[in-house]
Amino acid sequence: MNKAIRFKLFLMMVLEFFIWGAWLPKIFGYLPSLQFNPEWQQPLILNAFPVAAIVGMFFSNQFADRNFAAEKFLAFSHLVGGLAILGLGFTKSFWPFFALMLVHCLLYVPTISITNSIAFSQMKDAQKEFGIVRMGGTIGWILAAWPFTFILVDWDKVKAANPDGLIKWLGTVLGSGLAGQALLDGTRWTYIVAGIASLVLAAFSLTLPHTPPKKAAATVDKLAWVEAGRLLKHPFVLVLWIVTFVDAFVHNCYFNWTETFLKSSEVGVAGNWTMPVMSIGQVAEILTMFILGATLKKLGWRATMIVGILGHAGRFAVYAFFPNQSAIIIVQVLHGICYAFFFATVYIFVDEFFPKDARASAQGLFNVMILGIGALAANTICPTLIQKTFAHDGVTDFKGLFLVPLAAALAAAVALALFFRPPQKSQQQIFGTPAAAH
């Protein structure tokens, strides 16, 4: 793959994940400001993405793969989906907001796999080349955080200060974040920025290498979900699947609550800095991925996954018991361990441990849990927990709130330690299929 194509694919990934990273961190605090209730309205909007993920894994991903050139589907999806999320910046009524979010998510989620398809189609050695290209996605998520340090600024305060010189002006701007209702009103810009990025990617998609539709898979692929369900009869697969649900739930508790917690009086991070603070986790994710291979060799599958789950427990323990600003900012680095040592390790485990003809089914099985069911559970109950169950007279009991995912993470780590026992047999003995070479 030549450098020009690699750069295009890298930029494609930057834009793809910039879109998601621009709106996700702040939506959980924004929906209550629109007076959407936490019992069903907020969960309905938040669950548009995991529902789209489940639909995508069962239907729309394969439909897009088999019927459209990938780059054209990408362009169409980001054009219509971009207009939808752009509209969210100008919508405050529940049903229009929900409809636009659903349209965006149903079109956006399949593009995650479509961008992978475009990238893989251009690679001669995916093991060497894909990591560099996919890193663009993480960088895109990080970059999405930083425009808002300038967008969510009280410009009247900056004007009144009348700083002298560029350095003082920059310092005044960065230290004059919006607060209160003005900050909540300004959050609509997250959707406008995401929409603009989506429209840019729609246009850029037409410059990507042509990736024709794939032919319909063989009969075994048509029965992939039946095959995936059969994998659960193996106790070690079932245990890992259930633990993955718990970890995905805990992971989404982090996204549901962290931005609100950072803005709270207990932590006191300025509203224009919450997204950059959370982006520390993605920086750490890049660094952690570099040591994942060595960690797996030293600790093995189970211990590495347990460390990943305990990363969540450690982060929520700091949230609950040491809620000072410095500690909360520093502990964001654990996000890298949480993601790489569990989720990335699960994907690698599936690819390494399962025979070739079962891998796609197994990856789909765990993807449904990570992007779909786990997120669905968290998004359904998290708004009520933070706004009702652990809220008294308008004040949130963050300590009690964070003990919920802390306990769930500890239980998942114990379950994995006690019950996750991949058998020391050949793949043929376990799955009844010829062993795949690695």
Image: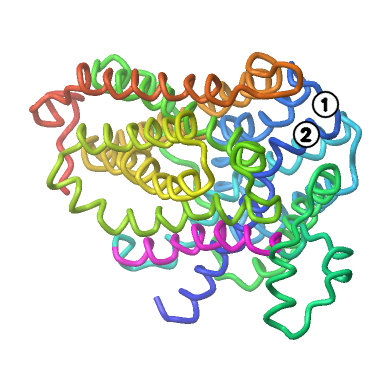
Residue shown at the point (40%, 31%) measured from the top left? 366
Residue shown at the point (63%, 63%) measured from the top left? 146
- Give the quarter of the image for residue 422: top left
Q: Nearer the viewer, residue 126 or 46?
A: 46
Q: Position of residue 217 (x, y in %)?
A: 44, 40
Q: Nearer the viewer, residue 122 or 178?
A: 178
Q: Secondary structure at mark 1?
A: loop
Q: Position of residue 259 (x, y in %)?
A: 63, 41
Question: What secondary structure do most residues of the magenta stretch adopt?
Answer: helix
48 left or right of 422 in image: right
Number of marks in picture: 2
Type of amino acid under label 1: Phe
Residue shown at the point (27%, 36%) measured from the top left? 307
Type of amino acid under label 2: Leu
Q: Position of residue 83 (x, y in %)?
A: 82, 53
Please say if the residues under marks 1 and 2 sit with CB atoms less than 8 Å apart: yes
Marker disc for residue 36: 1
Q: Secondary structure at mark 2?
A: helix
Q: Earlier in the sequence, mark 1 or mark 2?
A: 2
Marker disc for residue 31: 2
55 left or right of 218 in image: right
Tell me if mark 2 has few (under 14), some (14-19) or many (20+) residues whose alpha carbon lies within 10 angstroms of its own: many
In magenta segment, residue 290: no
Residue shown at the point (35%, 45%) measured from the top left? 337
Q: Nearer the viewer, residue 243 or 326?
A: 326
Look at the image and give the residue range highlighted in magenta.
Answer: 128-149
Could you tell me how far apart the alpha carbons at marks 1 and 2 are, in whole angstroms?
6 Å
